[in-house]
Each structure stands twice: as structure tokens, then as C-alpha cells.
Amino acid sequence: MKATTRILIVSVVIAIFGILSIYSSTSRKEGEFFQNLYRYQILRLVLGLCVFWFFSRFNYRRLWDWTYFIYSLVLLLLLLVFILGIVRMGAQRWLKIWWLTVQPTEIAKIMILLFLARYFSKKEPDDVEVKASKFGLIKALIIPFIFTAIPMFLIIEQPDLGSGAIIFFIFFTMLYLSKIRVRYIIIFVLVIVSLLPVSWHFLKPYQKARIQVFLNPNTDPLGAGYTVIQSKIAIGSAGILGKGWRSGTQSQLKFLPEAHTDFIFATFVEEWGCLGGIFLIVLYWLLVQVGIRTAQSTTDHYGQLLSMGIACMICIQSCINIAMTMGLMPVVGVPLPLMSYGGSSIITTFSALGIMANVSKTRNIF
Amino acid sequence: MRIRLLQILVALCYFILICQLINLAVFRSSYFRELADKNCIRFVPQQGGRGKILDANNKILVTNRLSYDVLILPQSLFQITQIFEKLSFILQISPEQLMEQFKRNYTEPSVPVCVAKNIGLDKAVQVEESKLNLEGVIVQTNVMRYYPYEKIAAHILGHLGQIDVWRLSKLASYGYKAKDIVGVGGIEERYDYYLRQQDGGISIEVDHQGRFSRLLSYFPPRNGKDIGLTIDLRIQRIVEEILDNYIGSIVIIEPNTGAVLAMASRPDFSPLSFLKSNSPKLLSELFNNPYAPLTNRAIQGQYPPGSVFKPLVATAALELNKINSATTFNCPGFLRIGRRDFKCWAVHNEVDLIKALAQSCDVFFYKLGLAIGPAKLHEFADKFGLGQLTGVELPYEAKGNIPHPLLRKMKTFQRWYDGDTANFAIGQGAVLVTPLQMVRAIAVFANGGQLVRPYLVRSIDQKDVSSSHQKIEQLPLKKKYLELVRRGLREVVANPQGTAHVLANLPVSVAGKTGTAEAPGGTHAWFVGFFPFEKPQFCAAVFLENGGHGAKSASLLKEIIERMIEEGIILP
């Protein structure tokens, strides 16, 4: 089977599961708005498939030239969020362009990928070796970090610690995958670890509470710990086969907050059971696996970094999200790619998958 | 190489997620399932009404009424003292008392705690109105026992209380649970099984805000079954009113069937004092009262019958051919038995049976007793139902005691003397009876030789059960002897020298026997009898503990009969 077909099948199955869960968790809410959410999501899936089709045909090498343009465009959007953004749930993350609500953070994740892939795969015209292997400390670490840190800082200030962390993770993965010297990676890790205690003071009170609650969920069962407790109850009460579609008490009766967005995994498992949950996790693994295989079989370093980066982005997001719903991580606002309700997330994920498909298709050119 | 490592890392991440998923959804599933159910399933109990208790004319003696309790949900309490202060202002109960109740009844943070029971409707409304300031305070409606006549027939009805350990150990297999409210004493206890309601309720699904989402199941509450008594409320009221201010008991039965028409005991209690939680002082007073108001003297009080025992002795002597209607004895005022003089209360000279009964001559009966012998006396007392349970449908009935030489020897290794026989013959010594046993024995003379079982319950759940509850036994007694004793009993009232002559001037003819039984603390006053003499409809026993002479009891009966005529219960 071709990689494109595999990506398509797996991602569409995940998205359909997502739509089913969105339908299930919102159908009993009051108000037309909530009851129609699944329709928007179907629309976005169709749109996402179009984007996927477009990017899978669009030669990814041409993105090389667009990188700085995309980078500055995203920076602009992120800055605009501060000025014109919509405030929802205490955070300013959304930008309304005419009737379209965009979350620039999602685009920023792809943008960082593109930027770093290009940066680390530069070659001299007269040398086949990748430049990165000869980088000094400044070029290998500090310059790419500055470029990453600017959008990351803007995102963390929104505040959206989760997405900031994901961008940081992407940066770290790209660093690891690039051909820079191992000692730089070790230096980077040491610096970050030594900075962690300091960063505690920069966290917002609710973020601190979330981490405290993660360490002991029962400290605040009706406040910050409530979501995790309810999510664990939803997952735990599902049993092996689940309660059946549209019969999950936790999500149907709204005990589980954010049942159609960040905690959609809990909604899904509650109704489809442990087996459904395992199936879903395996699907994500398959998707990531396709990305890794593509990276392994392509000889182009840029394509390799891109494909690997996209696979890791999906892996990091899905792992963080699922781990957080099961109480293995503090609660951060990270959507489950392809499942969670939200247009920006599903469309950017599909465009990333399109790029991945294109890499797998064009690997033999060089 | 780096990619290979990353691939393993990715697989490991997903593997950990799957492990945690299995851990939550499979191994700890039952725990979370329970939590999920607790989240969304609420049980709203609905109380059924306990069965009513009715009198002979279907007048309600006990029924149910709504009551209001104040409950506090501990988990939503932040400023407990403040809430208690506000509550105490409304309820007029001191905050300390509320706190004490709260601590006593506290079980779990999510279980509401009852702090005040049975507050009035007006206070309940006040609490509900200020609910915004009283966070976590719940007003619960309960079905509560209601006594329209408060104290009337309290001893027969019994009261309600929380099940105790002893009862629970016996009743657990019948579906009783700890903290159940059960009948204590009287009909409430004996027929608890029928009276008991079955509580139902609805289990509903609620959403995260506790709002109703859908109905899961409904189990309708079932009311208890009504019990109809043979008690006639009109007679009962008269009897209770007249017995007030005395210590003792009055029982009136229907002589032909054994239906108990009235049964009163004094001192009495109010069943309501067991329902109010804020009356522990009242309750301890009840329990510590030396006059034992909780005792139903009609069935639990065991007293020497004194002279009211004599008609039985007379019947025995006639049946055993020791005397006939013409036999006379001389009463010099005493009889020497062994080395002791047994006194009579007066000098009666020549007495025959009729005169002996009418004037209650002791010497006559000493002689009869000696002629009959204690074993035969015991046999006859036994025939008349003394010394055994009457079988009335009330719990904790006392048996009384009828002595026997053999029994005494077996129990105490003491000899039986003739003096004991003499005492036995006038209902003294070791003879102990309950007023109900006595009225049943005298009914034998009223209904022509039938020993009836007194019964109280005529219907259960509208179904007539009186035929299975009454038990009539024909005693092997000769009609002519019974008639003779009956005449003697009539003479007690009719003869101007009769001991109960006070009853003579009534429109109805009364027959009976007084008794003045020697007892520590003063003589007991007895009167047992039946009326109208020609066709007896009522059989009564009036007993006053340490009440003086038997004539006192007779005068009480006179008042009762007058009142009964007034109210048209007896047609003269």
C-alpha cells in the first residue's frame, strides 16, 4: 500500500471517530450552537481533505523558498492575536478574520517545523555534506533557538503553555534529528534542566495549580483537579467494551468538561471502551510510523527532517493529550490532533500530513 | 541511528498510554464505575404511610401526618457555626443543642445530617425562605405518626421508635435494617409486620449540576395495612377520663365474644414524646418514673385478686359437691387454722353462699377452700384462665401466678400449710392475676360458662379477622351452679348490705364482685362484674392500685355506666 493511502485511511478513520464523539457529547447540550458542532467538524474534515490533496501534490521543495515568508506571516498573526484576538476562557488565542476563527498557534507549529527543517538541512553548493554537522555552538543552538523562542514566547504569553511546550518539544526533536554534534544536544538539555526551577516563578497561578493537582489530584477535587478526576472516571468506568455510543454518562451528563475538545479521548473511551481506546492509540502509532518510514526511506535531508518532524508533532500532541486525560501529565490545553473539535487544528494537521505524503511520493527524485 | 532510537521511544510512549488505559478501564474499572454512578445516579426516597389503626367504628386512633426535619449536608459547609446560629434563631433551639445533634448523627460528608426533627410547618417555611443564607441546609418532609386523641389508648397502641439491637437481631431476617422505625409496645409492635410501610423511591439520572436528566426506575412506595381494633373509642374515652388521677387499670370486654371494648392503664404516657428528638429529658422521666407509666397494667400488672377470686372458689365447691345452695356456715369473725386466727372483715354469723358472696365473708370461703383443697383450687383457677396468658394480641403479657403445693415444693422446698389454702381461697398469698385475666374469668358467669379469649384486632387491611382471633371454649360447668353464683354476684349489688350497693340505683342491673386485696403500700381496690344482669353485654374489671376498698372501684364503674348511658351506648 502506498504511504499516501495509508495516511489517508488512518487519518480519516481518526477524524470520523472524532466527529462521532463530538456528536455524542454535544447532542444533548442545550442550544442550536452546540448541537450543530459536528456539522462544522464534517465541513472541516472535507476542507482538511482538500488541503491534504493540495499539499500532497504540491512539491514540498518549493516550501523551502517560502519559509521566511511563512515565518513572518505567522509572527504577524501571533502579534495580531494580542491586539485583535478573541478572549475565551481567560486566554487570547483566537483571531477572527471575517467569519473565520483562526488559531495562529496551530499554524505556528507547522511553521516552526518548516523553518527548522530548512535551517538544519542547508547545504553548500559544492558540498554534499549537510552544513549542520559542522555548526559551532552559536549556529547549532543559539540562532535556531532565538527563532523558535520568539513565536514560543508570544504563544506562552497568550497564555497557552501547552502549545508553547509542544513547540519547544518540536524544537528539541528537530535538534535531535539534525546532524548537529551530540555534545550540543547534551549542553541544551543541561541548560533546560537547570532552568526548570526558575521557570516555576514565571507560571501563572492557575498553571501552578494544575501542576500541583497533577502531583496530587485530590488537593482540589472541585477546582483544578475536577477535570482530571472526571476524565479518569469517564475512562475507568468504560470497562472493556464501553458504555455504547451516546450512552456515556460522564460526557452526556456534562460531568466531563471540554468533552468535545481537549478531553475528547475520555469521551471516546467512555463510549467505545478500553478496546476502542487501544485501537485509537494504535491508529496514532500507525500514523506516526508512516512518517518515520518515509523519513527513513527518503534521501533528501530536508524531506527527512520535515517528515520526521511532522510525525513527531503528531506523536507529541497525541501523547500529551492522552496522557493528560488519563492523569499521567498535568492538564495543558493541547488538542488531540484530528479528533478534537477545532478548525485550525484539523486543517493544519491535514496540511502537515499532506506534506508528509508528498515527501513519500517524491523521495526518488534526488 | 537517531531515527531508530526515536522510533523505539515513540512505540514506548504509546505502550505506556495503552498500559495506563488498561489499568484504568479494566483493572480499576469497578471502582470508577461506582464513582460514575455516584456522579449521576440519585435515589429520591418516597415514604409510604404506615398503616392506620382504627377503632370498632372505624374511627381513626393513629394515622400519619407530614412532618418537617432540618438536615445539614456537611460537605457544603464552610462556616458551620454561623449556619447553626442562623438556624437556632429560626428554630428557637440553642446552637449547642444543634451542634450536639449534628455530631451525634454525623456519618459521612456526603450524607445529610438531621439536626432537628419535627419542626412545625411555619418554621419549615421560614427555613426554606432563608435558604440562600443557609447553604447546605435541607428541609425534608417525612411522614410522621399522628395521634388525633394524643394519649387515648396509648398502652394498647404502643409507640414508634428506632429499632434496637435486640429487636434487630430477631427481625433482621424479615428485612428490617438498622435505624428502621418500628413499633415499640402494643399493637404497633405486635402488628408491625402488617402496619409497616414499604418505602419506595425513584432513581434518577442527574447532570453535572444535579439537574434531573431522565428517570431510571421507579419503585412505588406501599402503604402499610390498616388494623381495625375492637376498641370502642367512645367507651375508651369515658374510661380514660374516669381513670385519670388514679393508678390502676380498667378493662371492658364483650362477654360473649371476648372483644376488648376498652382497656386503660394509669399512669399513662404520650406516644408523641417518642417522636420529638428534642425531648430526651421527657423520655428519661418516663423511663425513670417509679409508677412505670409505660407499663400496661391491664396485661402486665400482676396483683393479688383478693375477694374477686371468690366466685371461682364458690363454683369449684358447687361443682365438687362440697356444698349446695342450702349449706350454711357460721362466721364468728375469724377462723382458727393451725395456730393462727384467720380474720373475717366482719362478723356475719349464719351465711349461705349467696350471702357469703354478697357480703364477701372470708370465713365461708376459708372453709370452702379447706374443703376443696389447694390442688383442686388450682385446677379450677386454671379452668378460668388464671395463671396463663390470655392470648390477647399485645406483646409482653404477664402470666400471673396460681400456687400449687407441688409447685411450691419443687421451687422452694417449702411445705404447704392449711393456712396457705385459706389464703388461696380468698385470692391472697401467692395468687397473682392481671386485670384482663380477671375480667375474662368473670365473663364465664356472664356468658353461661364460656371461657373467651380477649381479642383486640377485628380486621387487618379491611378484611375481617375477628372470627379467627376470637376463641371461645365451653367450660364443663353445670348451668344451675353457674346460675347460683350469678345470683350471688347480683346480690353483691342488689342487696343493701352487698359490698357494691353503690351500683344498685342505676337504670341497668349490674352484677359483680368487689375485692380489697392486701398488698404492700395499701389495699388494691378491685371490682369485676357484668351488666346488664339479664343479658350481659359488657364485662368490666376496675382495678385501682393501692386504691383502698373495693367499693371505690365499684363507684368508678358507676360513673362509667352513667356516662355510657348518657352517651347512649347502653340502652336502659
Image: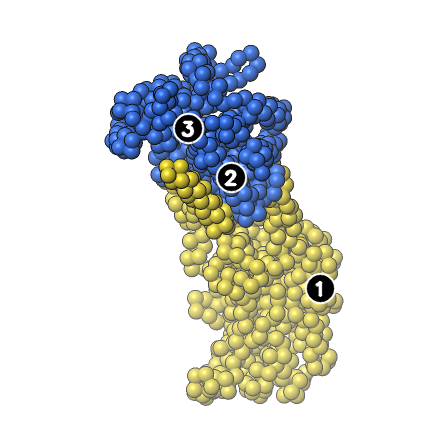
Chain colours: A blue, B yellow
Decide which of B326, B463 is in the foreground and name it. Answer: B463
Judged left or right of residue A244, residue B430 is left
On the question of residue B230 being in view, the answer is no
Q: How far apart are marks 1 and 3 (CA)?
A: 104 Å
Q: Mark 2 points at which residue?
A: A286
The x, y position of residue B171, in whole percent, is 54, 63
Q: Same chain for marks 1 and 3?
A: no
Characterize the local packing of mark 1: few (<14), some (14-19) or many (20 or more) Cα atoms within 10 angstroms: some
Image point (61%, 40%), residue name? A245
Establish whether labels 1 and 2 are both on one chain: no
Q: Name the residue under label 1.
A: B466
Q: In front here: A106 or B542?
A: A106
B465 left or right of A95 in image: right
* x, y percent for residue B429: 48, 77
In the picture, the quarter occupied by the N terminus of chain B is: top left
Is A238 located above or below residue B175 in the figure? above
Q: What residue type is labelled 2?
A: Leu
Pointer 1 with pointer 3, Cβ within 8 A: no
For residue B256, above or below residue B106: below
The quarter of the rendered structure image containing the C terminus of chain B is bottom right
Q: Which residue is found at the position 49% from the left and 32% from the top?
A: A336
Q: Which mark is residue A301?
A: 3
Who is closer to the viewer here, B452 or B494? B452
Kindly report the distance in space between the C-alpha atoms of the residues bearing marks 1 and 2: 83 Å
Q: Which of marks 3 and 2 is in front?
A: 3
Q: Please name the amino acid that badge 3 sits on.
A: His
Label 3 neighbour load within 10 Å: few <14, some 14-19, many 20+: some
Q: Which chain carries label 3?
A: A
Residue at the spot 45% in from the left edge and 54% down from the top edge: B286
As helix, strand or loop, the secondary structure at mark 3 comes to: helix
Residue A323 seen in the figure: yes
